[in-house]
């Protein structure tokens, strides 16, 4: 992957996109992909982290060069993730990778044909891009656990160039073909989708017989977990959230019961006659939600802490039921993404998104940060 684009300024170029914005040039008039300067270097507009602690900016960068095994993808849509907001507010040293880089790690688009098309993927084929890059040769990758790739210290959209640009270079291994699915709907599957799916797959073996599964926090990821639980298991699904409109949406998506967070302890007690639930997936991850999860689970159960709100909980003899697993899932594998795409293509999963134009990406991220997005925010690259 090419890095260090911001040190590049095309000959004759006098302003960055943010500077052009200040000059009030309409976004639609900008060339998303043009010839810059006398050297004829092909460029594109990218939304990039240029310095830690500074807001990201539109910057003109060269179209990526392809390394061996890579395919050029014309980006159609990018899902926005809360992780991006953390990156925007990070200080020097918070992360183990340098700026600059283009943001956006939930990417979907179309294959651009280069000299050698890869397998069944020919020009124009719609694809969703798995989180990566992943080395493909470490033990974790070879075992099919490429979400745990040992060679990974940065990724597309966090340390390496991501999808908030016209083009991105991706290893063929990390492209999942789409059939009828709109790339705009597919983009959030590569992170939000697989993360929820991977967590559900980890606890599914615990959901035997008349089991109860609890999902705490039914926003973008949690609402997907509710649906995957319905598709993959026979468990009764209980949604818990602080916001009643999210609970109503979760009920529509298949949750059997919905409890306000303030009433959760009492409600779960009633639903299980005091026996506790089989599994809890906590998509919030505060100390309060983790405490609720540990208190609610029964012997032999499992608690997955997916949300990264920074909470802690103490675990030890007498504090956790016997034979109970507590784990922190890590994203999803490329194989998970193939499964998720198949489920969505089959019409079994509803993807809720809010669409934004590329020019409005700053406002879209403000909505993500404020928790105002219904489902997942997706930016369409036009
Ligand atoms: Zn993410
Ligand atoms: Zn690896």
Image: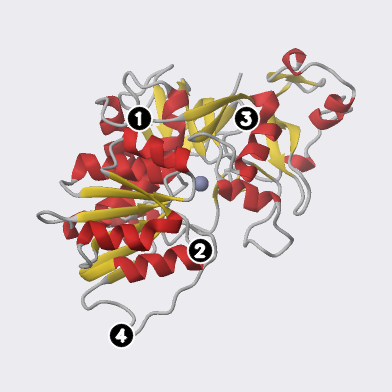
Q: Secondary structure at mark 3?
A: loop
| Residue that carries the numbered disc 4 in the rendered image | 318
Residue 18 pos. (x, y %): 81, 31
User: Which one is earlier in the sequence, the residue at label 2 or at label 3?
Assistant: 3
Q: Quadrant of the N terminus?
A: top right
Is residue 220 at least partly visible in the picture?
yes
Q: CA distance from mark 4 to mark 2?
A: 21 Å
Q: CA distance from mark 2 to mark 1?
A: 27 Å
| Residue that carries the numbered disc 2 in the rendered image | 286
148 or 77: which is nearer to us?
A: 77
| Residue that carries the numbered disc 3 in the rendered image | 165
- Left or right of residue 295: residue 286: right
| Quarter where residue 157 is shown | top right
Residue 134 pos. (x, y %): 43, 50
103 or 359: which is nearer to us?
A: 359
Residue 46 pos. (x, y %): 68, 32
Nearer mark to the viewer, of 1 and 3 = 1
Please tell me the numbered disc located at residue 151.
none
User: Which one is earlier in the sequence, the residue at label 1 or at label 4?
Assistant: 4
Residue at the location (26% across, 31% down)? Answer: 342
Nearer mark to the viewer, of 3 and 4 = 4
**Is label 1 in contact with label 4 (beta carbons under 8 Å)?**
no
Q: CA distance from mark 3 to mark 4?
A: 52 Å
User: Which one is earlier in the sequence, the residue at label 4 or at label 2?
Assistant: 2
């Amino acid at each position: 992957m090419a890095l260090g684009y911001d040190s590049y300024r095309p000959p004759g170029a006098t302003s960055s996109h943010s500077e052009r914005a200040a000059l009030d040039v309409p976004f639609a008039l900008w060339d998303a992909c043009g010839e810059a300067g006398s050297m004829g270097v092909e460029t594109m507009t990218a939304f990039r982290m240029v310095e830690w602690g500074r807001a990201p900016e539109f910057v003109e960068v060269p179209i990526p060069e392809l390394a061996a095994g890579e395919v050029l993808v014309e980006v159609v849509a990018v899902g926005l993730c809360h992780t991006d907001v953390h990156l925007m507010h990070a200080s020097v040293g918070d992360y183990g990778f340098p700026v600059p880089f283009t943001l956006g790690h939930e990417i979907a688009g179309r294959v651009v044909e280069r000299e050698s098309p890869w397998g069944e993927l020919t020009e124009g084929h719609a694809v969703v891009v798995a989180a990566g890059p992943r080395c493909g040769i470490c033990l974790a990758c070879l075992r099919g656990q490429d979400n745990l790739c040992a060679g990974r210290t940065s990724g597309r959209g966090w340390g390496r160039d991501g999808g908030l640009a016209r083009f991105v270079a991706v290893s063929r291994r990390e492209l999942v073909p789409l059939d009828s699915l709109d790339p705009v709907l597919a983009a959030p599957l590569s992170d939000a989708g697989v993360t929820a799916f991977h967590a559900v797959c980890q606890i599914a073996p615990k959901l035997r017989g008349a089991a109860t599964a609890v999902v705490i926090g039914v926003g973008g990821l949690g609402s997907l977990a509710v649906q995957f639980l319905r598709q993959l298991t026979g468990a009764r699904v209980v949604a818990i959230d602080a916001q009643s409109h999210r609970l109503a949406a979760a009920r529509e998506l298949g949750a059997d019961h919905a409890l306000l967070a303030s009433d959760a302890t009492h409600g779960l007690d009633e639903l299980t006659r005091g026996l506790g639930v089989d599994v809890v997936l906590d998509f919030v991850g505060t100390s309060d939600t983790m405490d609720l999860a540990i208190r609610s689970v029964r012997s032999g159960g499992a608690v997955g802490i997916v949300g990264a709100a920074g909470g802690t909980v103490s675990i030890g003899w007498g504090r956790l039921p016997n034979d109970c697993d507590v784990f922190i899932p890590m994203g999803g594998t490329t194989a998970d993404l193939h499964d998720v795409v198949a489920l969505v293509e089959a019409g079994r999963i509803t993807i809720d998104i809010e669409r934004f134009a590329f020019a409005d990406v700053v406002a879209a991220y403000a909505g993500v940060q404020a928790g105002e997005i219904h489902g997942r925010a997706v930016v369409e690259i036009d």
